[in-house]
Image (cartoon, rainbow, N blue to C red):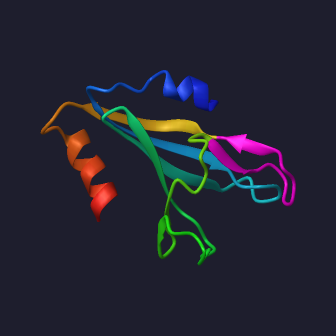
Amino acid sequence: MNEKELTKQFTKDKYQVYLLTSKIPVPFQFATHPWFVIVKDGKPSRWEIVGHIYKNRKDREGHLYNNFHKDMTKGFEKYFFTRIFNHGNILSKLQGNKYSLAERVVNFIENE
């Protein structure tokens, strides 16, 4: 899935949580890398755990990064040290109005 296809699903009047996954580079393709895309007031943000700590980034808390990649669907490189990337696939989606489980999950991811 590419970012354009994902953003078509975003709505301004709902809270949305997407769990995406992407394959890890060869030869470790048996494993996947997951991340969350949350949508609040129509604005998406991406949350993921990254193995390396980039100290110059202000959008992190330890290994937890907010918008590490600007592309919400960009996964790992297909092969190490290339600029060809896998795209994520939606594993699960949660959506709801105010006071819904989706709102509670969005607020938890943003604030905890």
> Which residue is at 32% across, 27% downward?
12
- Asked whether 30 or 59 is in front, the reply is 59
> Which residue is at 15% across, 35% downward?
98
Position of residue 6 relative to residue 35, above or below, is above
Count of all numbered marks drawn on residues in the image: 0
Magenta stretch, residue numbers: 74-87
Position of residue 108 relative to residue 100, above or below, is below
Query: Picture quarter containing residue 52?
Result: bottom right
Q: Is residue 40 left or right of residue 76?
A: left
Q: x, y percentage for residue 47?
A: 47, 55
Q: x, y percentage for residue 57?
A: 57, 69
Quarter of the image that includes the C terminus: bottom left
- Asked whether 48 or 70 is in front, the reply is 70
Quarter of the image that includes the N terminus: top right
Q: x, y percentage for residue 99?
A: 12, 39
> Which residue is at 61% across, 42% downward?
71
- Asked whether 13 or 28 is in front, the reply is 13
Q: Is residue 82 magenta?
A: yes
Q: Is residue 87 left or right of residue 55?
A: right
Q: x, y percentage for residue 59?
A: 49, 64
**Residue projecting furthest to the left:** 99
